[in-house]
Image (cartoon, grey):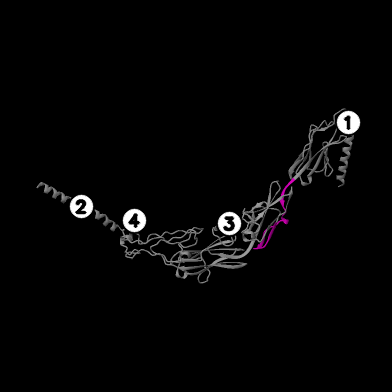
Amino acid sequence: MAAYCMEVVWGVLSLMVMTSLSFGDSNEDMTGLLPRFTKDVPNITVTVGRDALLPCTVEQLRGFKVAWVQVDTQTILTIHKLVITRNPRIALLHNDHRSWHLEIKNVRESDRGWYMCQVNTDPMRSRQGYVDVVVPPDIIDKESSGDITVREGQDVTLTCHAKGHPAPNITWRREDNRDILLNTAQRGRSSGMQGNSVASKSKDEELRARDSDEDEDEDYPGKGFGSDGSAKVVKGETLVLKKVSRLQMGSYLCIASNGIPPSISKRAHLRVQFPPMAWVPQQLEGAYIGQELSIECRTEAFPKSINYWTGPGGDMIVAGPRYEPLLADTSYKVFMMLRIRSVTVEDFGTYRCVAKNSLGMTDGIIRVYEIDSPKLYHPGEVTAAGGETNAEDFEERGGHSPTPSYKQESGKYKSGQSGKGLNEVAGEQDPGKSYGREPEHRGRSTLYEYTLKDPFDHRGPSGHGSGAHTRASVLPLLLLLLLLLLMTTTAEAVCGHSHL
């Protein structure tokens, strides 16, 4: 400390001595021109860690001296060609007795402030420039939220604090780029927020606006409810979520930026706990003996649930030759499917899809009932038209009825044939009619579409009997022949009488 004080005192004394010497020179030649600055010292902005250069150009310096001073701390940095300060990051670049540039290496925040380039004239001449040291944003971890777990229905406040120069701006986004639901209580009504205009939506539009994850083409409990009370970006150090639901579960990004690259972000993952719930798209399934049948169930739970099936006897179903349980989960949602490879009498009854976690359990019920199986053609069997099939017609069909039209179920799993659904329970199939299903009834059974045909009914495309058509076409020919015969007989009689 004493050495530093001595250095400052020596620098001040040196400046005073040079000033007095310059006065003597100026007094000797009063008609000479005094030093002048060719341009002002500029204000510069530099990022922390970079190098800064403050230029100072003086003409007609003659015997006068140039010095650099840090104004805020009143520290003499350089005098003429000497660097007075012991700061190793300070350097002086000079050339031709007119350029006196101050260089600051590896700039720090403490270097921010005013710097003066002065000439020891009487009065003193000087120019000042400001060095602004900018700092990229940095998030203060101790003062910012991390991962958090809450129960569904509670309020959550996420905080994020950052430092930097200029002061950073804080914005919040969801990592999956979905809208941030600020208040789930605003479902079904429009809400206005500063900087985010939200319009009300009809029920159909609301359903179409829900999240687009796989298997979310059905409307079942726990899905999104439109954009009311939501925003893509939320500004501010705090993010308040009212009465959180499972839809708000996910990662939130706190992004700090101040125009100085790079921006920085911090992830806060929100977990929302709730007991399991189940949804069954088709509660009644019809099947016949020997059919391959698939039944479906969907559940939601967090923490992650344990999922399994129980059969008609109440026992847990495990994978084996008869059954194939399938699971597919995304986040807190689970898609369950049970495939029965070949239905037997023991397979008819009530099935349950069960979901359990630490907060509770639930199940969905599906009843499988028996339906009649499609019949095959056999030689000599009486058909719906009342005739018997012959052997030739039977061989042409290969011993089977016309191939049923099987409509494969769309979805992530390829399933086999399944029984008819709830809407078809009201009536039995009429062999003389064709049956089908609407494409929107997902999970319903696959039906066969065919019409029984009398092998001895040789009717054409018009649907009229070919025998009746033949009889109708022969009658005019007979009448024409009789008319020709009568005309011939009459002609011969007339000719014979005229001859006589």
Disc 3 versus disc 4: distance between alpha carbons? 51 Å
User: In what element is the residue under mark 2?
Assistant: helix
Tag 2 residue: 483
Residue 340, visible in the rendered structure: no
How many numbered discs, if any? 4
Per the image, label 3 sits on a secondary structure element best described as: loop
Say which residue label 3 marks: 202
Q: Which of marks 3 and 2 is nearer the N terminus?
A: 3
Residue assigned mark 1: 26
Amino acid under label 2?
Answer: Leu
Which residue appears at 42% of the width and 61% of the height? 435
Query: Around disc 4, counting alpha carbons within 10 Å, would you say few (fewer than 14), some (14 to 19), or many (20 or more)?
Result: few
Q: How far apart are marks 3 and 2 (CA)?
A: 80 Å
What is the crowding at mark 3: few (fewer than 14 residues within 10 Å), some, or many (at least 20)? few
Mark sitting on residue 462: 4
Whole-angstrom CA distance, mark 2 to mark 1, is: 155 Å
Q: Which of marks 2 and 1 is nearer the N terminus?
A: 1
The mark lying in front, picked from 3 and 2, is: 2
**Considering the numbered disc 4 on the image, is that residue within a helix, a strand or a loop?**
loop
